[in-house]
């Protein structure tokens, strides 16, 4: 993997959208966009060199058939750092995120789906940690490749699943662009979309973890919201119980999909290990930050 550039001078928030107005309503979309804007404003006020940091918000409409983009266009009016991209058909959240990254120029990446929220301090805290040397590193000039923060949910979760959630979703992640590009982005294979519980996010995390330093911050700086029909709601009973007490209840078709997903994840992981030039065990470090 290419050597990480130590000092970052740009960041982008990638926002994939699909029929948010029809599925969630205008208040939810406005709240999401407003939370991103509030977090950027907080960053501008708190980060010492904020004026030297280029910020982007890249909104990717994934073939919506409702009026989602009308709301977005109105919100983004007079905001020159916003880019609006409309895909001709629905390709899935993973593809929309990957398109957003390709259209951005930023060295560091944030992700927020159209129905989740940043807390005001999120961008400032995550970017600040990502842009500082690792104090405990044996090698001078080592930097984190990714930062994860804590995740607030209105539904109480079992501690095991709370940690699993925080270690997998991209909402609480800030990652260097070269890490995203090295692992090949989010998986766009159709089987991930067909599977009952998605798992694109788990694949992304699995590919990323062995190859870069990661910081884990306990402070909760994002809100992951449960909505009717969401992956989160489908697994809520499992997430609120101790591991092993609630089964996933997969159909034979989903069991087959799950096996195929595991094969794809392992195949790419093997390829990444072959491409990687460096001591795997030394770089596979995770630092806990209060």
Image: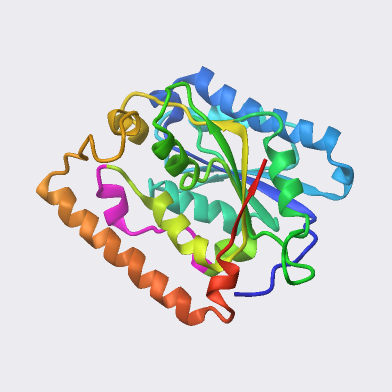
Colour scheme: rainbow
Q: Quadrant of the N terminus?
A: bottom right
289, 203: nearer the viewer: 289
Q: Quadrant of residue 133?
A: bottom right
From the viewer's perspective, tell me whether residue 95 is left or right of residue 140: left
Q: Nearer the viewer, residue 138 or 257?
A: 138
Task: State which quadrant residue 44 falls in.
Answer: top right
Left or right, residue 15 beside residue 260:
right
Q: Is residue 187 magenta?
A: yes
- The magenta segment is 183-196
Task: Residue at 45% x, 57% y: name it.
Answer: 204
Q: Is residue 19 left or right of residue 48?
A: left
Residue 222 image offset from top left, x and y in percent: 58, 32
Whether 71 is drawn above or below 290: the answer is: above
What residue lies at 20% left-to-right and 39% top-to-bottom?
Answer: 247
Q: Looking at the figure, which quarter contains the C terminus? A: top right
State the residue lying farthest toward the left: 252
Residue 186 on the magenta span: yes
- Asked if residue 224 lies left or right of residue 253, the reply is right
């Amino acid at each position: 993997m290419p050597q990480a550039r130590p000092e970052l001078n740009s960041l982008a928030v990638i926002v994939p959208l699909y029929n948010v107005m029809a599925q969630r309503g205008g208040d939810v979309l406005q709240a999401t966009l407003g939370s991103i804007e509030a977090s950027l404003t907080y960053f501008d006020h708190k980060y010492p060199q904020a004026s030297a940091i280029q910020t982007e918000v890249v909104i990717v409409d994934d073939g919506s058939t409702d009026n989602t983009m009308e709301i977005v266009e109105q919100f983004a009016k007079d905001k020159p750092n916003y880019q609006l991209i409309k895909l001709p058909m629905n390709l899935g959240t993973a593809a929309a995120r990957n398109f957003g990254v390709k259209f951005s120029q930023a060295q560091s990446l944030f992700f927020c789906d159209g129905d989740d929220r940043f807390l005001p301090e999120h961008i400032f805290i995550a970017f600040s940690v990502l842009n500082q040397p690792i104090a405990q590193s044996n090698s001078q000039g080592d930097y984190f490749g990714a930062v994860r923060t804590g995740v607030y949910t209105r539904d109480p979760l079992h501690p095991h699943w709370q940690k699993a959630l925080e270690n997998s979703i991209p909402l609480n992640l800030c990652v260097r662009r070269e890490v995203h590009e090295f692992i090949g982005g989010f998986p766009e294979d159709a089987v991930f979309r067909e599977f009952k519980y998605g798992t694109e996010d788990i694949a992304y995390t699995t590919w990323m973890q062995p190859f870069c330093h990661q910081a884990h911050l306990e402070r909760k700086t994002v809100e992951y919201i449960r909505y009717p029909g969401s992956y989160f709601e489908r697994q809520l009973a499992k997430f609120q119980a101790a591991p092993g007490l609630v089964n996933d209840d997969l159909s034979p078709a989903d069991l087959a999909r799950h096996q195929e997903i595991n094969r794809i994840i392992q195949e790419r992981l093997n390829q990444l290990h072959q491409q990687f030039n460096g001591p795997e065990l030394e770089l596979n470090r995770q630092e806990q930050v209060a």
